[in-house]
């Protein structure tokens, strides 16, 4: 690149980063808009865009009409300047999505994790198939984030334990990075759902909230100051083990290698999908899943109210315990049970919490429209990594 007298290299890099960051955050813009929002002069903005074009990072994608002069060119970041992969790993499937730098999903595939006894081989197969479907080389991925149930140690990046994934153990994180030849991030699945909620859902733009996830398992994500709170060992949000009145305490949580921890006892035994489905049957609402049971109860009107009242009372035990400590202001109900209950459930939880503690948070239903919020959160987390890498390269 030609050196221009009087323009320090560091200043050019700062200007380039500012313009690129603005285009990534706000979409197509004209030279004048970029200059106005970054404080750059028209000449400097033009030079900045020329450098970014030369590097293959931005391109003209159209023109904006207006004014008496010619239409102004609209600049945008080239979608293929970076790609990312997000994965959700569960006991029955591995879902993988490949997206471009704008976060648009190019391909999505699902594979059976049992097709490979080794978790590293299973993940490699899933990513390879997704990249092949997207016509993107594996080496072009600038971010890979994997969502899993269980506790992920923020210090080592490894899954400490997962009831659903006994094959995931210490050393998996390093093995995956070595296999894929790039940095890999493993993240708790409920934390990723919270990332999606803050970007696209009911917590959009909110810095302090908690997301209570009730499906096969029970979990909570805590967002404080716009950042996930994981705790020292990654166990923040493992609310399923919360001791609650009238329920036996969880036992044998710490087990010998090769044995699975028990999920009996604690709040988990009251509001997991299995517990809700069993409860619903007692009220005469039987269906194929806990979510469908709740949906039937909501549709039944007055007849379903006793069941919804009881589910809300149980959920309120966990919500109240968190709120008197963190006072988050907003609680999002997600997962199979939370999504199915809608406002009929959230209003009851809000009232039940207000009866048992001095804090009354706003309780809302998840508003993420993506059918797989964990996978969407993984893509968004990977996208953040890729953009940071692109901005600093």
Image: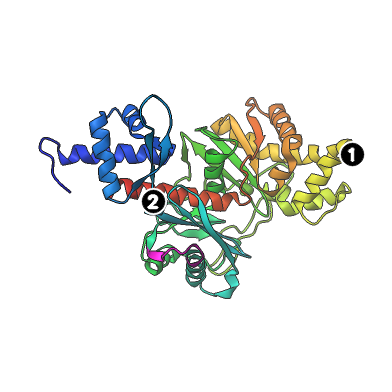
Q: Which of labels 2 and 1 is toward the front?
A: 2
Which is nearer the eye, 60 or 221?
A: 60
Secondary structure mostly seen in magenta is helix
Q: Residue drawn at (14%, 38%), measured in percent from left and top?
A: 8
Q: Which contiguous range is marked in magenta?
A: 132-139
Q: Residues within 10 Å of mark 2 (few under 14, many from 20)?
A: many
Which is nearer the eye, 66 or 161?
A: 66
> Which residue in the structure is indicated by mark 1?
303
> Which residue in the structure is indicated by mark 2?
386
Which is nearer the eye, 53 or 123?
A: 53
Question: Dot 1: what SS?
Answer: helix
Q: Position of residue 329 (x, y in %)?
A: 58, 29
Question: Dot 2: what SS?
Answer: helix
Q: Residues within 10 Å of mark 1 (few under 14, many from 20)?
A: some
Q: Is residue 21 left or right of residue 381?
A: left
Q: Residue drawn at (36%, 66%), measured in percent from left and top?
A: 181
Q: Is residue 324 left or right of residue 182?
A: right
Q: Earlier in the sequence, mark 2 or mark 1?
A: 1
């Amino acid at each position: 690149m030609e050196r221009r007298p009087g323009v320090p290299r560091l200043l050019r890099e700062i200007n380039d980063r500012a313009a690129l960051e603005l285009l990534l955050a706000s979409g197509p813009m004209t030279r004048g808009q970029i200059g106005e929002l970054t404080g750059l002069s028209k000449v400097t903005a033009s030079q900045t865009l020329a450098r970014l074009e030369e590097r293959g990072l931005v391109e003209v994608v159209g023109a904006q009409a207006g004014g008496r002069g010619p239409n102004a060119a609209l600049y945008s970041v080239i979608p293929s300047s970076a790609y990312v992969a997000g994965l959700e790993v569960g006991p029955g499937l591995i879902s993988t999505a490949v997206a471009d730098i704008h976060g648009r999903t190019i391909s999505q595939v699902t594979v059976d994790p049992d097709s490979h006894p080794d978790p590293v081989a299973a993940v490699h197969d899933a990513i390879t198939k997704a990249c092949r479907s997207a016509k993107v080389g594996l080496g072009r991925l600038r971010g890979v984030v994997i969502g899993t149930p269980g506790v992920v140690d923020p210090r080592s990046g490894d899954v400490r334990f997962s009831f659903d994934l006994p094959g995931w153990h210490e050393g998996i994180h390093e093995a995956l990075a070595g296999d894929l030849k790039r940095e890999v991030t493993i993240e708790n699945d409920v934390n990723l759902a919270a990332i999606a909620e803050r970007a696209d859902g009911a917590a959009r733009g909110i810095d302090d909230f908690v997301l209570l996830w009730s499906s096969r398992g029970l979990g909570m994500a805590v967002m404080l100051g716009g950042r996930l709170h994981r705790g020292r060992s990654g166990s923040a949000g493992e609310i399923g083990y919360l001791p609650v009145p009238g329920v036996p305490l969880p036992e044998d949580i710490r087990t010998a290698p090769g044995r699975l921890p028990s999920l009996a006892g604690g709040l988990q035994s009251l509001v997991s999908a299995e517990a809700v489905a069993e409860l619903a049957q007692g009220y005469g609402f039987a269906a194929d899943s806990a979510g469908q049971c709740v949906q039937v109860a909501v549709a039944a009107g007055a007849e379903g109210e006793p069941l919804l009242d009881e589910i809300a009372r149980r959920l309120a035990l966990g919500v109240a315990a968190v709120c008197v400590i963190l006072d988050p202001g907003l609680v999002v109900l997600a997962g199979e049970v939370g999504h199915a209950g809608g406002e009929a459930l959230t209003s009851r939880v809000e009232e039940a919490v207000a009866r048992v503690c001095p804090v009354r948070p706003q309780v809302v239903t998840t508003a993420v429209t993506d059918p797989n919020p964990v996978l969407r959160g993984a893509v968004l987390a990977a996208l953040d990594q890729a953009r940071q890498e692109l901005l600093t390269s």
